[in-house]
Structure formats: C-alpha cells, structure tokens
Image (spheres, rainbow, N blue to C red):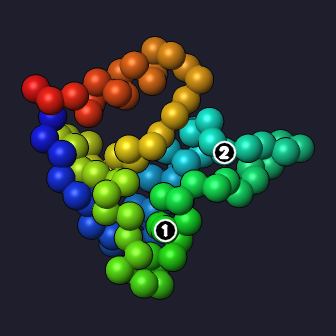
C-alpha cells in the first residue's frame, strides 16, 4: 500500500480515536491495578506535545495508508493473527 506522512490531528476526537485504536491496544502499554500506565512510547509522547506545538508531530511514525487514515508504524500486539494482518498493511503492492 502507498504510505504518506500524516498531518497533526485536527481535533481531540481524532486523537482519542487513534489513541483507543493503537496506544490502548499496544503491548507497550502497561496495566497496573486495572489502570493504564504511561509508556515510554516516543510516538505517544510526541502526539501529546504536538497538541501545543505542531512541529513536534511524529510524521515519520504515524502514516496515512490507503483507506485507513492514521496508522502507527510501531503498534505491537501479542495476538499473532492481528499482528500478521497489521504488518501486511505496510507491504508494498
């Protein structure tokens, strides 16, 4: 699929959707006592900073890909089927 750099989110809703779709499902997120803990994910940190300074947007880490708009290049899951399908999105046609 063709990849393009993404642009900063245009709204908090767009951020929330991305965060729920990727950050909260990523195996890098640590859960303690049923609550999500901060990660050391540079992409997540850059997204938060970009809310106040769009120059910080992680344009090389979040891409636009085909019919999907924002995709995180660093998303990981322990679900092997999901991970395999996700990696296929980044393969050249």
User: Taking 11 as reference, is 92 left or right?
Assistant: left
Residue bearing mark 1 = 46
Examine the rendering and report whether any part of residue 88 can be seen: yes
Q: Are marks 2 and 1 in contact (CB under 8 Å)?
A: no
Q: Is residue 57 left or right of residue 12?
A: left
Q: Secondary structure at mark 1?
A: helix
User: Hey, which quadrant is residue 40 in on the image?
Assistant: bottom right
Residue 6 sits in quarter: bottom left
For disc 2, the marked residue is: 29
What number of labels is visible?
Answer: 2
Where residue 39 sits: x, y (%)?
67, 54
Marked residue nearer the N-terminal end (2 or 1): 2
Secondary-structure class at tag 2 = loop
Image quadrant in which the C terminus is located: top left
Q: Position of residue 14 (x, y in %)?
A: 40, 61
Residue occupying image coordinates x 28% and y 51%: 63
Q: Which of 42/83 is in front?
A: 42
Residue at 15 percent of width and 34 percent of height: 1
The answer to which of 70 and 74 lies nearer the viewer is: 74
* Mark 1: few/some/many CA within 10 Å (<14, 14-19, 20+): some
Q: Residue furthest right?
A: 33
């Amino acid at each position: 699929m063709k990849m393009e750099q993404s642009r900063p989110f245009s709204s908090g809703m767009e951020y929330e959707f991305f965060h729920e779709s990727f950050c909260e499902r990523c195996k890098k997120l640590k859960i303690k006592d049923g609550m999500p803990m901060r990660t050391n994910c540079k992409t997540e940190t850059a997204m938060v900073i970009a809310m106040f300074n769009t120059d910080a947007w992680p344009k090389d880490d979040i891409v636009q890909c085909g019919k999907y708009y924002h995709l995180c290049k660093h998303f990981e899951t322990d679900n092997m089927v999901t991970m395999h399908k996700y990696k296929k999105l980044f393969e050249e046609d």
